[in-house]
Amino acid sequence: MTLPFPLSDQSRQRLLNLERLRAQGVDPYPPRAQRSHTTAEAIRAFEAAPTTVTVAGRIVSVRAMGKATFAHLEDGSGRLQFYLRENVSGPALYAQFKDLDIGDFIQVTGPLFRTRTGEITVEVQDFRLLAKALHPLPEKWHGLRDVELRYRQRYADLIANAEVRQIFVTRARVITAVRRFLDERGFLEVETPILQPLYGGATARPFITYHQALDQDLYLRIAVELYLKRLIVGGFERVYEIGKDFRNEGIDIEHNPEFTMMECYQAYADYHDMMTLVEDLFGFVAETLNGVRRVTYQGQEIDLTPPWPRIPLRQAILDATGIDYEAYADRDSLRQAIDARGLTIPPQPTWAKLVDKLFGKYVRSRTIQPTFIVDYPLALSPLAKKKPDDPTHVERFQPIVVGLEMGNAFTELNDPLDQLARFADQARQRAAGDEEAQPLDEDFILALMYGMPPTGGLGIGIDRMVMLFTDQTSIREVILFPQLRTR
């Protein structure tokens, strides 16, 4: 069979080794393995009492010395040395081992002993090939460093870099901790549609697909917000979902078109309650991982202990740029103020987008310690409740840590007529050129007309949370298979 890619000399040699093994009657891909201990369990067992074990894993080093060979195998729990002698295993089995390669999976059986250098080792009485590796491990297998190759061949990255495997172990622990935190506070985990007849709940361009049987377009969800709020209407008082969202947007160190979000909604709560929830959540995750409410990120200690500062967006932008956006009522006048101060904000279709870009570049990116930026302009927040003392702003906040927008939260808008008016304003913004403006969701308006209690809502970007707790500056480092341009 012709392979669809060129082979290296090493791969061709491995194919020859494979043929020799088959000629000896060896099945290079048997359907089953037998394993009595992981490598870590074997080491613990020896420290308790001498024992015979069967361990399995990938060969990661070989040192042959005539009629004896030292080698190491590695499994998911660690690494263990094994020692093969011709006079113990027999000449035929010892000769067969010479056709094995670094990278092959093997199981070895024998008693454990400690070498003169103190290393716990299996003296091999028998071994069996479990899977033949036809491609060599990455050069200097412990040090694959080409960034694009690491993302394209994540399997090779995980083989080569133990620290990368640890990132994804930590990611799993973060998600488990988030789920436990919410479960313990009475939130019900639910699942809502990923394929939606109408997208909404965020300002983003969607991915669109077509359903043959229904003869209609469907959208990959950009958020779960509107469905979870329907559940609050239906009588659930605390709900959450952890799942994938999809946004048809650019790719950079903070954005991937497919990403993981946690959204939760709590009846009879407001954005102040959700701020407390965020402080407690991040503290809980930190303590679960590290035992303390602190984390080191890029050499700087980040203190997650509450209370976090609460700074109004208007004040934060004014302090950072000298611009009071309330003094400039339309896009053109705000644009002129930005240009007059020599600030580098690219052209934007609407006033709200200019404010958002000012915030992102001059406030968010420079906010390192945990901070809540609160009280956003109405035009930026079509799903949030107006502030009673200032109807030009809404009860919204974003938690910012290490310059990353960790999430978004509101006191949720529950007035169906106000929500309808907001959707109409979004339609005007779309007509003005904002392709990310939200469409009118008539069914959501109908749901609100049944009545929704005062509610606090929160969305947290799981990938960015993992970036914080694994000290990573790129979202691609915390997503197993990030989206990449086709070669």
Image (cartoon, rainbow, N blue to C red):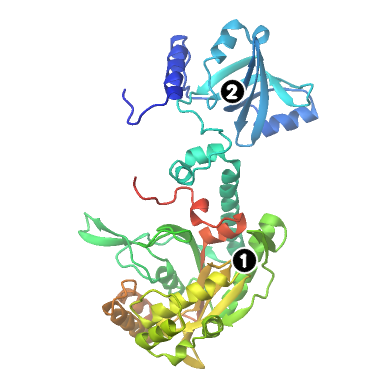
Q: In this view, does 346 lie to the left or right of 299?
A: left
The residue under the point 59% across, 66% down is: 402
Which corner quadrant holds the C terminus?
top left
Which corner quadrant holds the N terminus?
top left
Residue 486: x, y in percent?
34, 47
Say what secondary structure mark 2 lies in: strand
Q: Does residue 348 lie above or below 469 as drawn?
A: below
Q: Is residue 59 left or right of residue 200?
A: right
Pick the front one: 199 or 320: 320
Residue 198: x, y in percent?
31, 68
- Mark 2 Cα shell of 10 Å, populated few (<14), some (14-19), many (≥20): many
The residue under the point 55% across, 78% down is: 373
Pick the front one: 398 or 446: 398
Q: Does residue 78 lie above or below 168 as drawn?
A: above
The residue under the point 66% across, 22% down is: 82
Pick the front one: 14 or 36: 14
- The residue that disc 1 covers is 281
* Mark toward the start of the polypeptide (1 vs 2): 2
Residue 443: x, y in percent?
32, 74
Mark 1: amino acid = Leu
Residue 71 appearing in the image: yes
Q: Residue 432 appears in which quarter of the rendering? A: bottom left
Q: Residue 379 appears in which quarter of the rendering? A: bottom left
Residue 336: x, y in percent?
39, 86
Q: Does residue 272 lie above or below 257 as drawn?
A: below
Disc on res. 107: 2
Q: How far apart are marks 1 and 2 (CA)?
A: 43 Å
